Every structure is written in structure tokens, then in C-alpha cells.
Image (tube, helix red, strand yellow):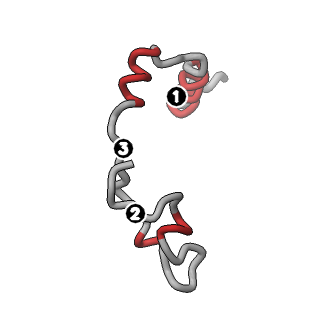
Amino acid sequence: MHKPLQPAVLNLQENIGAAGWQLPEEEYDTISNLPQQRYFTGSLAMHEDGPWRNYEELWDEKDVSEPL
């Protein structure tokens, strides 16, 4: 007896079908020009014994409080 496709399988098939989709250039440009800002500065990930001891080790710039 044939089993019906599960919702997760149907979602996967739908997602695979969207692989060729592209955002129109005008909308891409609009989104690209939006101001960027981190809502997570990384302070919770830093520790003196951890892999990231300061902002410079975690991010590319020193001051992460300002918008990118």
C-alpha cells in the first residue's frame, strides 16, 4: 500500500523547486542599501579563557556598537 507523502517531504520538494528563484535587481538594491546593525554584539561569547577574548578577535572591527 502506498503511503502519502509526509508534510516535511512536501516542504522539501517545494524548497528544491524554488532553487532557481532570484530577487529582482531593483529589490536587491533596495535591501542592500538598508542600514545594518548587529543586535548581538558577541559579549556573551567572549571570555578570557575562550576562543574570543575581545571584539577584535570576534569581529572584523573594534567598535560593534555603531551600525555597520
Q: Residue at x 38, y 28 (%)?
A: 31
Mark 1 surroundings within 10 Å by alpha-carbon count, few (fewer than 14), some (14 through 19), many (20 or more): few
Checking the image for residue 27, the label placed there is none
Outermost residue toward the bottom? 49
Checking the image for residue 63, the label placed there is 2
Asked whether the residues under the numbered discs 3 and 1 touch, taking CB atoms below 8 Å apart as contact, a structural biologist would say no
Q: Residue at x 42, y 30 (%)?
A: 32
- Vertical placement of residue 60 versus 18, above or below: below
Say which amino acid is labelled 1.
Asn
Checking the image for residue 36, the label placed there is 3
- Residue 33: image quadrant is top left
Q: Is residue 30 left or right of residue 46?
A: left
- Residue 50 percent coordinates (x, y): 57, 79
Q: Say which element carries label 1.
A: helix
How far is mark 1 from mark 2, CA to CA? 41 Å
Q: Residue at x 33, y 61 (%)?
A: 65
Q: Identify the residue under disc 1.
A: 11
Asked whether 59 or 42 is in front, the reply is 59
Query: In what quadrant of the picture does the N terminus appear?
Result: top right
Say which amino acid is labelled 3.
Gln
Asked whether 51 or 32 is in front, the reply is 32
How far is mark 3 from mark 1, CA to CA? 31 Å
Q: In the rendered structure, which disc, 3 or 2, sits on the residue that comes first in sequence?
A: 3
Q: Residue at x 47, y 69 (%)?
A: 55
Q: How many marks?
A: 3
Outermost residue toward the front? 62
